[in-house]
Amino acid sequence: MSNNYNSAQSYRPGGGMGGMRKFGTGEKAKPASIVSMFVRVYTHARMQLPLLIGAVACVIAISLLEFIVPQLTRLTIDHVIPNKLFSKLFLIGGGVLGAALLLGVLRYISTSLIASVGQKVLYNLRNDLYRHMQSLDVSFFDRNRTGDLMSRVTNDVSILQQMISSSMMQLFTDFFTFTAIAIYMLWIDWKLTLLLLATFPFMILTTKIFGKRMRSSFRTVQESVADVSDHLQNTLTGIRLIKSFTAEAYESDRFAERTQRNMDANIQVTRLRAAYEPIIDFLNFLGLAIVLVFGAWLAMKDMMTVGTIVAFIAYLRLLQNPVRHFSRIINTIQQSAAAYERIMEVMDTNAEIVEKEEAIKLPRASGQIVFNHIDFAYSKDSAVLKDFHLELEAGKVTALVGSSGSGKTTIAHLITRFYDPQSGDITIDGYSLKDITLASLREQIGIVSQDIVLFNGTIEENIRYGNLHATDDEVLAAAKAANADGFIDSFAQGYETQIGERGVKLSGGQKQRLSIARAILKNPRVIILDEATASLDTESEQHIQEALAQLLQGRTCLVIAHRLSTIQQADQIYVLEQGRIVENGTHEELLLLQGRYNQLYELQFPQTDVS
């Protein structure tokens, strides 16, 4: 597992697709039901109650109007034609056109209202999902791919939009229409209606069988879309690495593999739908055959008029329309159900790092941090810290050195409470980290890392991220303190210069000085320097060291370093190996011990034998 602060955004060369699993566990997640999806959508939609009431009123009016045309048809065949009532023909024609006009107006209004409701529901749902992601801890983002999470917020929510904006209203309209017409047909001739309705259980069974398979296929489609999104995010972020290794063809082949999986899944869905719709159409024609044959028999027995049979056939079409519509929109419903499952996997995930209900706000800290008997592991079989003790004195500079993987960056993660130890306790000024609010802890800690995170925007916006309420003068003062004002002023647009994604338009030293300016603007009580100058040239390092001198004044500082030249003035240096402190002291004291620190020092500063 990566120990980088930006692990969720770092380039990873691929990875396999996971199944439908709960985040952070190995057990299968229980599929969310379509009913629960509609209930969840309704909880958001009911906040738009006036719009919903208007839409429902339009649906009821539409259903009532659809009764008129078949009745006008029956009246024309049974009375107007036999009695040669020419004067009634214009009234009949006007009635049909008037009903059609009203239906058009009502459908426009209902569609507009439900579209407005749908967009507002999706606005709330997408924001809820994003806010919930923001509330989850770092380990959640360690476990899950960035591209997959992006796909859930964008693609999966957009799929729900199709259902909410159109399919839900169609379903409601069809349900109301089906119920009203079925009752009316039973009143006209219950025997004929029951014969007709006998085909519907077969339709329901067919829909259930195909719906389950479609949903599974759509789940595969959406997972493959997430896989494509993740591959894009990784390769576009790491485009310089790809080009430096001339790996364009290799990455294109890997991208093709992922898009082929998406193509195959979509073909499977199309085949299922192609098999499902003809079966539903056959059952609909079976119903029509029943009405024609049995209705004609009743008419020949003078038990039913021809006009009634024609009206019955018209109502049959209206009765079958909801089934026909459902057979079309089941595609959207099952796709939305699969999207909803993926959204709810995130929404149902709880943060592992949580505040106590009675957590208090940390007062302005002096910065004394103590690790007491800490055991920590990222996974069960790889302990990082074992019975670990460490004290960072307030207002002093404490340095950590040691081999890669010895636990240095993990200590920084634990101080910020990105993770919690499995046992032991960490305190700041005597307060256990678990007893104070996360916001009050983290707002007093500043991090300057080798892996610099800058956002696509202006220089001013990136510095101001340290304190969103800072004045322009405070931003300028922070940049000056970080030795950044010189290179900023050299740009034509100064502080309004766009730096590109991850600060691509800046040098390493310039990016680092911006990150220091951001930390200075935050004005934290505790500073963590995680290999802050490891990748810089000598001149840039000199500028950075001058900026850090401004940053560290009067603050508690933890320095994590491989380059021993950066920590020689530290008040206390701890040497870590395999999660344990093996030596500690000042630079001079550790050299005199002739131990591990001295070995590291001699590796970096070999003494030339002049004898």
Image: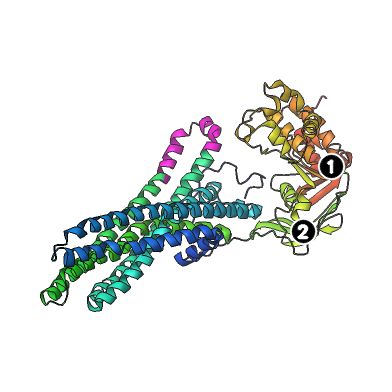
What amino acid type is highlighted by mark number 1? Gln
Q: Which of marks 2 and 1 is in front?
A: 2
Secondary structure predominantly adopted by residues drawn in magenta: helix
Nearest to the observer: residue 148 or residue 392: 148
Would residue 19 be seen by someone viewing this image from the given angle?
A: no
Q: Where residue 86 sits in the image (x, y, percent)?
A: 16, 58
Tell which of 64 and 346 is nearer to you. Answer: 64
Residue 575 lies, in percent from the top left, at 79, 46
Q: Residue at x 55, y 43 (%)?
A: 12
User: Which image quarter is the C terminus in?
Assistant: top right
Secondary structure found at label 1:
loop
- Residue 398 falls left or right of residue 182: right
Q: Which of 446 and 321 is in front in this view?
A: 321
State how far apart marks 2 and 1 are (Cα).
28 Å
In the depicted structure, whether residue 425 falls above or below residue 255: below
> Horizontally, is 148 left or right of 378 in the view?
left
Which percent across, then down, holds residue 410? 72, 50
Question: Quick check: 131 above or below 78?
Answer: above
Mark positioned earlier in the residue sequence (2 or 1): 2
Indicate left or right for 451 with 544 as reference.
left
Residue 514 seen in render: yes
Q: Residue 594 carries which label?
A: 1
Task: Return the residue found at the far front.
Answer: 87
Res 456 quadrant in image: top right
Residue under numbered circle 2: 374
Start and end of the magenta stretch?
A: 236-258
Q: What element carries label 2?
A: strand
Pointer 2 local density, CA inside 10 Å: few below 14, some 14–19, many at least 20: many
Q: Residue at image x 46%, y 45%?
A: 228
Q: Does the magenta stretch include residue 179?
A: no
